[in-house]
Amino acid sequence: MTGYRPQGNHNDIREQRLLREMKAFAYTANVPVTLYDNNMNILWECRPELKICTMFLAHDIRNNQCNENLKDAIATAESLNEPYVFMCASRLTQIAYPVKIENSLKGTMIAGPIIMGKNRENALKHIFENLPDYRTHINELLEIIEANPIRTTLEVSCIYEVFCDCIFAHNLMENSQPSGDAAIDDLLQSLQKRDLSSAVAAMDIIFQHAYIANGGKLNLIKVYLSDYIASLPKQTLQNYVFTEGYETLLSELKGAATAEKVHDICRKIAAFMTDDDDRHPQYKGSSHVIEETILYLEEHYADDIELKGIADQVHVNTSYLSSLFKKETSMTFSQYLNMIRLNQSVKLLKTTDLPLEQVAKRCGFASQSYYIRAFKLHYKETPGKYRRDFKDKSKRERLL
């Protein structure tokens, strides 16, 4: 097959599938695609006849500069571990994306060069500038140029999305884990402990399984992840369900245009949910009763609070407030109050050396023993261990 020249061993099924997809992309988009290894050797390429730069190399024009430019782009893409768009010395657009095989770096796939410009004359001007004796090679040059359409910015953007989605899906399959159940448990524990790196790692695995389970279909992936992430506040008893930032991220997730964007937003949500900032619940329902109740709890969590006392404050009976609170917040009154007290206790554990008895008292717990039980139930470890782990982690980070 013209332009399809595998070099080396490509027995791996996933690798073969990636190369088939890249071949389909190259012929459909009319863009050359090349897979380079870490030493700049070509492992595979498709549509090499479209590469204008091959003419420069053939006539030893800008050879060193082209190679250095390509080497820098590949190094940048690999260091970022994400797609990297760059322009070569001849102002031609190219896209570099690292490729993984068996969960290790295989090389970098390059889409391009692509001629981009508002009109044909402007686009070709830079090519002629880099080929001073172009008249000597005019026939060869025109033949290659005729095969390469001049792309608009929108067209290049579409080429970028299709190219990146193919490799993103491949890399995702290469990184897939055997089970997502453990990742769900890990995520919940990481969110409760406010452990950013562990939460992001668990969210990555959950996304991978959502992608694979739904066959890479974007709408199904978004529905699956939106429903799951929307349930997290209830499962972790955290207050970000009421914050504007959390709702904004959920909205962005539902409107994401690519799987890669969905993945990026999932990671942002994990980061948001482990943020230690003091985010007071921002109730967005229509009940003034619940709004007043929440504000009271935020201000008086250290006091001896009972549902009846607050019901009297907001001028409703106790049973009505209890049922309305559960309906509006998806938590019981006691769960919500405990959530606030535990969140406040975490701040004291991280920022003070107060004895646990004092931490419990300042946060409104009836006794140290009750506080430890509540903390262990929520965070899966004692407050003493949580404090030690946090200090050890902070010390290690300072040494790095």
Image (tube, rainbow, N blue to C red):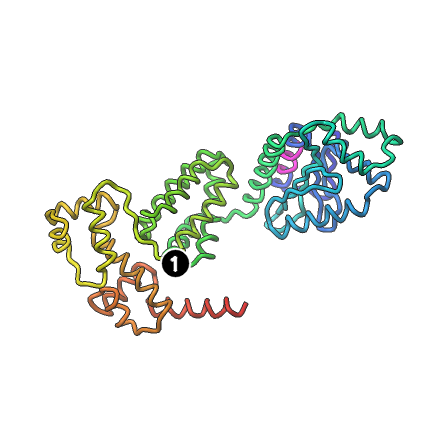
Q: Which residues are magenta?
A: 17-23
Quarter of the image containing the C terminus?
Answer: bottom right
Q: Amino acid at mark 1?
A: Asp
Residue 109 image position (x, y, % from top left) = 67, 42
Residue 397 image position (x, y, % from top left) = 50, 66
Q: Nearer the viewer, residue 56 or 28?
A: 56
Predominant secondary structure in magenta? helix
Residue 89 image position (x, y, % from top left) = 75, 42
Is residue 179 visible in the rendered image? The answer is no
Residue at 33% across, 49% down: 233
Specify whether 246 is left or right of 7: left
Residue 159 image position (x, y, % from top left) = 62, 33
- Is 210 magenta? The answer is no
Is residue 22 visible in the rendered image? The answer is yes
Quarter of the image containing the N terminus?
Answer: top right
Specify whether 52 is left or right of 354: right
Specify whether 370 is left or right of 145: left
Task: Assess disc 1: are there few (<14), some (14-19) or many (≥20) residues with their C-alpha within 10 Å of its C-alpha.
Answer: few
Name the residue tied to disc 1: 276
